[in-house]
Amino acid sequence: MIPDSVPGGHSIITVDCRELEPPEPMVVVLEAVDKLQKTEVLKMLHRQAPRPLFPLLEERGMLTHLDKFEDGSIELWIWQEVQ
Amino acid sequence: MRSSGLSLDQAPPEDIPFRFFLTAPVFGLLAGSLILYRGVLVFSSSWHFETIALTHLITLGWVMMIMMGAFYQLVPVLAGGQVPWIALSRVVHFFMIIGILALAGGLLLISPLLFPVAIAALLLAFTVFLTQLLTALFRVKANRPVVVAMRISLISLALAVSLGVLEIGAITGLWPPLIERSIVKNLHVTLALSGGIGGLIIGVGFHVIPMFYLSSPFPEKRAIWILRAGMFSLAAVSVMLLNSAGSVLLFTAMLPGVTASIIFTLTVWQMLLKRKRKVVDATLRFWQIGLLAFPLSLLCLTAHLFWPDERLTFAFGLLFLMGFAATITNGMLYKIVPFLIWFHRFSTLVGKVKVPLLKEILPAKRTSGQLLQAALAMLTLLPGALLQIDWLVRAGAIFWLTSSGWLVLNLIFAFRQKPVTND
């Protein structure tokens, strides 16, 4: 389910990083972010909150929403700030 | 469940953890040189000044240096805490070096002039470090096991350092002894090793094993139980030591903590065996050696309660400090350093240029060679100290020196990796 704060009407690109070793999740997500269109939102699945990724996303002007689950896994939603 | 207000760029500048990490194997070289120079004599009595100097070159010089660098780096990443006055960490590093050199020098040269320098420098370094980290960790609202373990570790270190300073002052006549020396020594060792070093390694293990080895998460309820049992034993053993309790009472007090340590070891071992990526690298082997040495060291410690043979003290010291603490911290350096280099120097270039993989920042052939030397050092020092064989101890010292020197070179190799510019 798409969280309320994530813009609606966007197409969702899912990146599953749950079986990737650091820093591959960051590489995969940042490469996907660089190709992300304004009409798209990226959904990252990971084993835990990727703290080091946040400053890099902020530097690229991205907006994020993080959902954490009981087992520690997360869903991180990433989209472009619309000026 | 939603989470907001995430920490952004809280990681310290790269030079802060790196200066601590690089200093550790340099103290390893000093420790190895001392063993090589004095041979089996350093394993003759745990009260011997040379043995105390050697112990502190390893505990403060190697293990504590890596722990401090790791605390500065991991508290923002694992606990989400902001370490205040981060620039002061460079002052902590400087005074740690002065303090350790003055302490070891004072003990080796029996120089009364060096002890006040050691006390002042170490007190300053630890006061700043503990204030920074305790402030950061008590500001964090989360009570996750890793945060609790880090708090236990820091509080134990604060008490251990206070007792250590009391002891040096009493030995050198700066002030009269407040408590009997053997009680201070046993309390100091218990708090520093079980609470300080054990607490941090166990707490970080909860988190980094799943992260770096793609294993299942450490079961949270088990982690909480392990920490509670460890805290109970730490407090109970301290009270027993203060009251000069006998072996049976001490053993009873230790039992929950020893059981918790064994459960931690078995759980991590199982997690490593069932990891999703079946890659075998030096860091995995460092963890496995450490996990074998840890219960063996506890066995020696427990046996020493009922069979007070000094050789068991040395077996415990070697297995716990070199086999467990120095080995696991060594292995973690090989995971943390390449990641930090990648993060600080290459992460902003993703999508712009081809960025290196971690195994290119620090190739496996470099780390596996050092692993072999570290393992050989343990395999020779342990029987050498137990059977009091001088040439075996000196051979162990050579392996340990090679291992430490190799680690220095590997870290320098990694630190030299920088993005290639086209101008």
Image (cartoon, grey):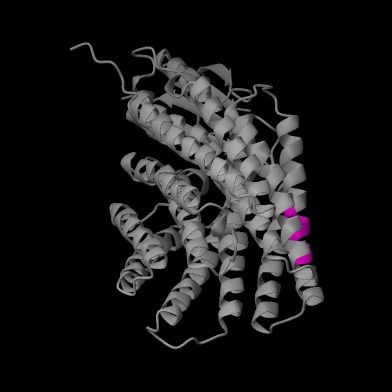
Q: Is residue B144 above or below residue B46?
A: above
Q: Which quadrant holds the N terminus of chain A?
A: top right
Quarter of the picture containing the C terminus of chain A is top left
Q: Nearer the viewer, residue B303 or B328?
A: B303
In the rendering, at what x and y percent does residue A32 appear?
46, 16
Residue at (47% x, 23% y) in the render: B358
| Residue A56 visible at all | no
Of residues B268 and B120, the one nearer the viewer is: B120
Q: Residue shown at 58%/66% (left/top)? A: B46
Spot occupied by residue B281 in the image (x, y as percentages of width and height): 60, 25
The answer to whether residue B169 is left or right of residue B421 is right
| Residue B371, above or below A24 | below
- The residue that appears at 64% across and 32% down in the rendered structure is B285
Please state the horizontal and vertical placement of residue B132, each as a whole percent of the image.
Answer: 39, 60
Q: How many marks?
A: 0
Magenta stretch holds residue B422 = no
- Residue B84 can be seen in this image: yes
Measured as percent of width and height from the top left, residue B72 is found at 42, 49
In the image, B365 versus B260, the foreground residue is B365
Residue positioned 48% across, 72% down in the render: B164
Report the magenta residues as a range.
B254-261
Please indicate whether residue B39 sits to the left or right of residue B338 in the image: right
Say if B248 sits above or below B213 in the image.
below
Would residue B151 appear left or right of B247 to someone viewing this image? Answer: left
Query: In the figure, residue B287 lies in which quadrant?
Result: top right
Residue in the foreground of this view, choosing between B104 and B208: B104
Look at the magenta stretch and give its main secondary structure.
helix
Residue B238, quarter of the rendered image: bottom right
Asked if B30 appears above or below A44 in the picture, the reply is below
